[in-house]
Image: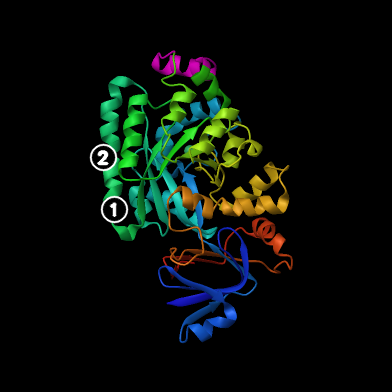
Amino acid sequence: MRAITAPYIFDGFDYQLNKAVVFDDKIIDIIDIDRLEINYSNIDIIEYKSSIIYPGFINPHIHLEFSSNISTLKYGDFMEWLHSVIENRDELLNSADDNIMYQACIDMIKSGITTFGAVSSYGLELEVCKKAPQRVIFFNEAIGSIPSAVDALYNDFLQRVDNSIKADPKDKITPAIAIHSPYSVHPILLKRVIQRAKENNMPLSTHFMESPYEREWLEYNSGEFARFFKEKFGVTKAVTTPKEFIEAFDSYPTLFVHAIHLKEEEYQHLALNNHSIIHCPRSNRLLGCGRLNLSKCNNIPISIATDGLSSNWSLNIFDELREALMMHYNQDLDKFAKELLKGITSTPSKALKSNTGEIIKGALADFAVVSLPHLPKDISQLAIQTILHTKDVKSVWIDGEEII
Ligand SMILES: [Zn+2]
């Protein structure tokens, strides 16, 4: 058992002054610093000066498999990007060896990310995720829209899910399920995959309405995707409608990734069914997809993620928060900065059913300690100054062990 102290802690929702956090692999107590040595004698204490103790940060959506991309893929328009992914897929996948993917995990931990959600198309990164110091929500992805291939794809998917379930608990892998998108997953496959998630109460995520082309195709069977599907697969009609797709998730809270091109009633549907959104602002900007309209997202929890290096230039969570802060320029600065920090702590932790992301008794002892040269005197400035001035954190703890 040991304790860490700092002038401030952020408990996942708010800042508290002069607290000590007592923990082993889980948080045992949060008490006033001046009570620490009275209540706990002979305890190891680390004092962080001019610092804020945060829960370890959660990056709920990345694609490690494309970690070798730096300047290969084409940015500016979703379809052009997609064509460049198809053209360079083999080269990128082959060059993303274990070392490159492991380096991506280490880059994340430097910015305080102690949990990440890795979407896996082929299961190639499972071994790297086991070796990574972080907790990994391992999202086995289902994809396939051609009915004749559904059985084979489902069996391959089940095999990958099983492999992630078999991981040793010390590797900190949480098996989870991802659906690629409404345009790439047949409704029969969709139904089976959601059922599989329900059986083991696994976290479930899906890309949804990322580009304007997606709505055009799903709703009207037209636009750039119509050209794409005709050319590649000889298909002229989408496998599902937005309504059918979204209703397939009723009764099972799901993380909808991007959700930019939604209609009013679809946002309401997400809220009513306790779904949440994962917002990847830099990825959306780079792929020409637009900007999530936060004013439409009433009562929908929003987590923030970097997405993969296939649509971003870094996996640093503070790079993402700074861009989000600037991109959503019409939000109140102080309040929004705090919402963003919730979006990488308590909000994704709830959506992922993870016992992290909050500094409360019983939570896992994962922390990211941020130091500032001068702590602002006004508590309302802590969130904004943390976001503006942090690139790498001072210290990272996972399971009560100091990693950095
Ligand atoms: Zn994605």
Q: Position of residue 41 (x, y in %)?
A: 47, 86
Q: Secondary structure at mark 2?
A: helix
Q: Determine the image quadrant of residue 300.
A: top right
Q: Nearer the viewer, residue 348 or 170?
A: 348
User: Relative to residue 357, is residue 319 drawn left or right?
Assistant: right
Report the number of numbered marks: 2
Amino acid marked by disc 2: Gln
Identify the residue at image location x=33%, y=28%.
189
Q: Nearer the viewer, residue 76 or 338?
A: 338
Identify the residue at image location x=43%, y=54%.
354
Identify the residue at image location x=35%, y=53%.
173
| Colour basis | rainbow
| Residue 151 can be seen in this image | yes
Identify the residue at image location x=48%, y=83%.
40
Q: Position of residue 258 (x, y in %)?
A: 54, 36
Reply above or below: 273 against 106: above
The residue carrying mark 2 is: 159
The residue range painted magenta reads 220-236
Crowdedness of circle 2 by 10 Å Cα count: few (<14), some, many (20+)?
some
The residue carrying mark 1 is: 167
Amino acid marked by disc 1: Ala
Q: Position of residue 24 (x, y in %)?
A: 41, 72
Crowdedness of circle 1 by 10 Å Cα count: few (<14), some, many (20+)?
some
Question: Mark 1 or mark 2, which has the lower sequence index?
Answer: 2
Q: Determine the image quadrant of residue 248.
A: top left
How many angstroms separate mark 1 from mark 2 (CA)?
13 Å
